[in-house]
Image (cartoon, helix red, strand yellow):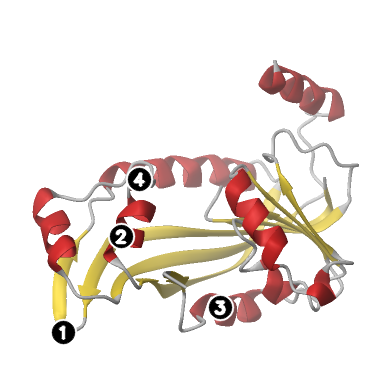
Amino acid sequence: MAVTIDPEGRELEALAHVVDFDGLRVLDVGCGDGRVVWRIAPVAQSVLGIDVDGDLIEMGRREMPPELRGKVELRETSVVELDEPPACFDLVFFTWSL
Amino acid sequence: MLDEDGILLDLHPIPPSMHAFSPGKDLGVVDERQFFRLVRATERELQKTVDGGLFALEAETELGVIERFDSVEELFETVDEWDNIHLSKRLRARLERSTPPIDFHERLALRRYRRTRARFPHVDESHHRRVRERVSS
């Protein structure tokens, strides 16, 4: 891979100290190619990852681990255009996108 | 969309500006002044939601992360798409001559907010529907 974000795992380490994703319905805003989604999805109840960059979303869909396909969705959209029911997420994560 | 008592997590870059290194060499600092003006403005807006009682800040931490580029080509392909971030001519020249991997070191803030039960009385689902209609038109 030509670009590696956080090869030392500091992001995940910090997330583990600040929040427990276990059983949560998560919205990841600015998910990119899903690199953070893959790490939180195994314990989360569900993850919807959104990003306005369609190329990254397509890449993420291709590279999604098969075991996560039942609980993870990646969608090309913005948080303003997202039309989901009220109170459908327990956690909204702005990854470098707020 | 966020449930009552739901969590908002915000992860974003903070000063100091990104610093570029290649093996054994300090290549210099990226100009993020414009970007950090935007960050400060966003933080002020988020603070308004805390001051207004919509969210409560529960935890925060800072961390250093690396963005590693294994090729100079991929570096420029990525960096040239960044908004509000600039490479000086000197830094660009150093990057072009450098030997990968090239590491950009940056500092991030991670904050956890809790949605409170307070409400802005005039903000409801019809407001959000009007915003979506304006955006899509």
The first of marks 2 and 1 along the sequence is 1
Mark 1: which amino acid?
Gly
Residue A21 placed where, x, y %? 76, 73
The mark found on residue B51 in the picture is none
Residue named by callout 1 = B24
Labels 2 and 3 share a subunit: no
Tell whether B110 sits left or right of B66.
Answer: right
Q: Nearer the viewer, mark 1 or mark 3?
A: 1
Q: Nearer the viewer, mark 2 or mark 4?
A: 2
In the rendered view, tell whether residue B3 sits above or below residue B131: below
- Quadrant housing the N terminus of chain B: top right
Q: Nearer the viewer, residue B39 or B116?
A: B39
Residue named by callout 2 = B73
Please tell me which residue is depicted at 83% across the width and 36% down the height of the picture.
A83
Residue named by callout 3 = A14
Q: CA distance from mark 2 to mark 4?
A: 23 Å
* Pointer 4 chain: B
Q: CA distance from mark 4 to mark 3?
A: 23 Å
Residue named by callout 4 = B35
Mark 4: which amino acid?
Phe
Indicate the secondary structure of the residue bearing disc 3.
helix
Please tell me which residue is depicted at 21% across the width and 50% down the height of the picture.
B87
Q: Classify mark 1: residues with Cα within 10 Å, few (<14), some (14-19) or many (20+).
A: few
- Quadrant housing the C terminus of chain B: top right
The image quadrant of residue A16 is bottom right
| Residue B113 visible somewhere in the drawing | no
| Residue B105 visible somewhere in the drawing | yes
The first of marks 2 and 4 along the sequence is 4
Instruction: Determine contact: label 1, label 4, CB under 8 Å.
Output: no
Q: Nearer the viewer, mark 1 or mark 4?
A: 1
